[in-house]
Image (tube, rainbow, N blue to C red):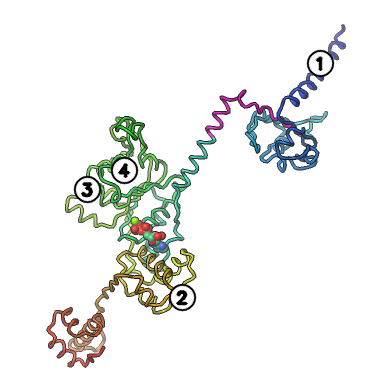
Amino acid sequence: MNTTESLKDYQRVRLLAIRSLFEIIEQSSEGTVIVDRDANIVWMNERYARRFGLESAEVAIGKACESVIPGSLLREVVRTGRPILLDMQDTPKEPLVVMRLPIHDDAGAVIGAIGFALFDELHSLSPMLKRYLSMQEELASTRSLLRSRQTKYNFAHFIGTSAASLEVKRRARRSASAESPVLLLGETGTGKELLAQAIHGASPRAHKAFVSINSAAIPHDLLEAEFFGTAPGAFTGADRKGRPGKLQIAQGGTLFLDEIGDMPLPLQSKLLRVLQEKEFEPVRSNEVIQSDVRVIAATSTDLEAAIKRGEFRADLYYRLNVLPINVPPLRDRLDDLPALSEAILEELRSQHELNTEALDLLGQHAWPGNIRELRNVLERAALLSDDLVLDAREIRAAIGTFTPVERVAPVIEVVAHETFSEARERFDRQLIESALAQCGGKVIEAAARLGLGRSTLYKKMVALGIAESL
Ligand SMILES: Nc1ncnc2c1ncn2[C@@H]1O[C@H](COP(=O)(O)OP(=O)(O)O)[C@@H](O)[C@H]1O
Ligand SMILES: [Mg+2]
């Protein structure tokens, strides 16, 4: 055999090898598909067509590969000319292991691609596949956990255009990009938690967890484990395996410490360590864990008074008080009432609206429960009313215990050319008139409120020309 002949022989063997390879793979594979340079299917075997719910392979001819095989990457192979030697392809049944190769013409140009679904006999690949499937499961559960840890509110949910509200929003927005702790100060129901969520959502940590823990709602002896988690074997029973604390769950994200004024002193020391050293130890473990959380704290109690009583650590207070935000009570931003009421009714998917008298009445109540109370009142009124327009009577009934706002004493201005005694008379008149108004015109009550005898008040009213029947 001369060299040319043996070379011809090699070529023949090579061609036969190529053909056998194709045939073997095609027959033993779960599916084979060939596309042209536009990634349209030109051939597909019957088995593969059936897997994707087609009656026969003929139906697939001429169709874009992705419309038959969702998620197919054959178009990419045609475009790049690069094979994808091993990959997973999701199908309506279980995932398949696939190989995708470009097809070249004699001149070397890419004219299409071929995809083989190699295995369905998943157990032949089971170690690898088990890992793939378990990773997928883990991913799905992490995602859903994260979703449940994600926030529900953003800054748009904080309704209010009064000067006080705008200032709160401005400070909260600015704090979002910072890493230092935020301290939200305000009565219950003023929107502290809403703001905490909004700050988290606008911060670089938004895609990580927002975890809250309320020191007033959890028994003090359980708080530490709740915070820091427990080491395996620290307790018997359910905790034998150890449990992650809120700090671990919040890693990378934001930890919201609600009612921090109620936090017991020993825990305050440990929290200070988290803030300063960025580390903590799970209960009864010797392991030190690095922590990466941003802290937003909130309280409805006066922390400075708590420090004086020895109930709150001054050093923790200073560490937390870097970006304090005072959230004003509703009675100090009554201008927000119309917009708030409208937003709440809308959120309740209620068709109701308030008439003028009803809105006026809202402005006369002191709202000790703030916006949470407003929400309950509107919800109750809307439930009980047969009419789509809520009036003052219905609102009054829904409020329950009505607490009138203490009107601030009128400011006495210096009026040009007014003498001291004229100004004094003006002041006396304003004072008596508003006392009478607050007491529904009853002179005896107004006198008591002003600390005057009844006849003294009468004399003053006569002198000032104030009529009794206010
Ligand atoms: N400015 C606001 N605009 C709209 N809704 C608010 C506002 N502030 C509070 N709320 C609503 O009032 C309720 C109480 O708010 P929350 O944040 O829990 O108050 P806090 O944490 O101060 O007790 C929530 O339903 C919240 O959505
Ligand atoms: Mg709260």
Name the front one of labels 3 and 2.
2
Picture layout, residue 187 above or below residue 382: above
Q: CA distance from mark 4 to mark 1?
A: 73 Å
Q: Which residues are magenta?
A: 112-135
Q: Earlier in the sequence, mark 3 or mark 1?
A: 1
Dot 2 or dot 4: first in sequence order is 4
Q: CA distance from mark 3 to mark 1?
A: 86 Å
The residue singled out by tag 1 in the image is 13
Looking at the rendering, the quadrant in which ligand 2 lies is: bottom left
Please tell me whether mark 1 sits on a helix, a strand or a loop: helix
Q: Quadrant of the N terminus?
A: top right
Mark 3 secondary-structure assignment: loop
Query: Relative to the observer, which residue lies in front, 269 or 420?
Result: 269
Q: Residue 433: x, y in percent?
A: 24, 85
Q: Is the CB of the residue bearing disc 1 within 8 angstroms of ligand 1?
A: no
Q: Nearer the viewer, mark 2 or mark 4?
A: 2
- Label 3 CB less than 8 angstroms from ligand 2: no
The kind of residue tagged 3 is Arg
Instruction: Compare marks 3 and 2 and give the one earlier in the sequence.
Output: 3
Mark closer to the chain start, 2 or 1: 1
Q: Which residue is mark 2?
A: 387
| Cα gap from disc 3 to disc 4, whole angstroms | 14 Å
* Disc 3 and disc 1 in contact, CB within 8 angstroms: no
- Is residue 197 left or right of 331 when viewed as pictured? right
Give me the disc on residue 313: 3
Q: Quadrant of residue 418?
A: bottom left
Q: Which residue matches tag 4?
A: 275
Who is closer to the viewer here, 62 or 306?
A: 62
